[in-house]
Amino acid sequence: MEAAGDGSELPSAKQAVTRETFTFRVRKEKLREAELVDGHYLLRSNQMGEEPAVLWERYIRLTQVQLTQVEAAFKSMKGELGIRPIFHQLQRRVEAHVFVAFLGYCLLVTLKSRLAAYAPGLTPKAVLEKLGKIQMIDV
């Protein structure tokens, strides 16, 4: 068995973990320090007239919705738009790539909402496939 340096003992790599081979003790001073900061969260708002509990509930609900929307956006960008990671060497190129990807996503969301209103049976992917077959010829 190995000593962990705080009165605890750990079993060796090939030894089974049992009550005899593993012991521990709680370092109360460390636990008190952790409890002092445990569960504290600072939320800053410009809405001074609201109760803090109400603001917190709104924040939690909004955060969950936004996380779901962000995950859906990335899934859409990878799937429907076919955007894949590209490794750039310069910061301005990274920013340009993110900007172009975001514009593409904005157009996709706009297309989805327009299709939902005017052509509920169509998907953005189907429309993009049809538009991709159009060819222009200058005569």
Image (cartoon, grey):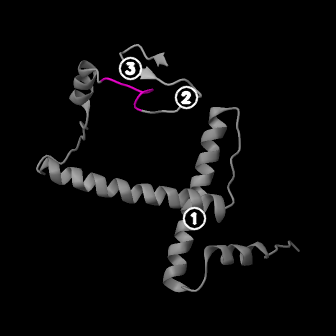
Q: Which residues are magenta?
A: 19-25
Q: What's under tag 1, amino acid-wise?
A: Leu
Please give the residue where the numbered disc 2 appears in the rendered image.
15
Label 3 or label 1, whichever comes before in sequence order: 3
Q: Say if the magenta span includes residue 120.
A: no
Q: Residue at x 30, y 58 (%)?
A: 61
- 120 w.r.t. 7: above or below: below
Q: Residue at x 62, y 74 (%)?
A: 124
Q: Image quadrant of residue 136?
A: bottom right
Q: What's under tag 3, amino acid-wise?
A: Ser
Which mark's residue is nearer the viewer, 3 or 1?
3
Q: What's under tag 2, amino acid-wise?
A: Gln
Which mark's residue is nearer the viewer, 2 or 1?
2
On the image, the x and y values in percent for residue 25 come to: 31, 23
On the image, the x and y values in percent for residue 66 come to: 40, 56
Image position of 138 (left or right of 124): right
Residue 107 tag number:
1
**Which quadrant is the C terminus positioned in?**
bottom right
On the image, the x and y values in percent for residue 20 come to: 41, 27
Residue 8 tag number:
3
Label 2 or label 1, whichever comes before in sequence order: 2
Mark 2, Cα crowd under 10 Å, few <14 / some 14-19 / many 20+, is few
Q: CA distance from mark 3 to mark 1?
A: 59 Å
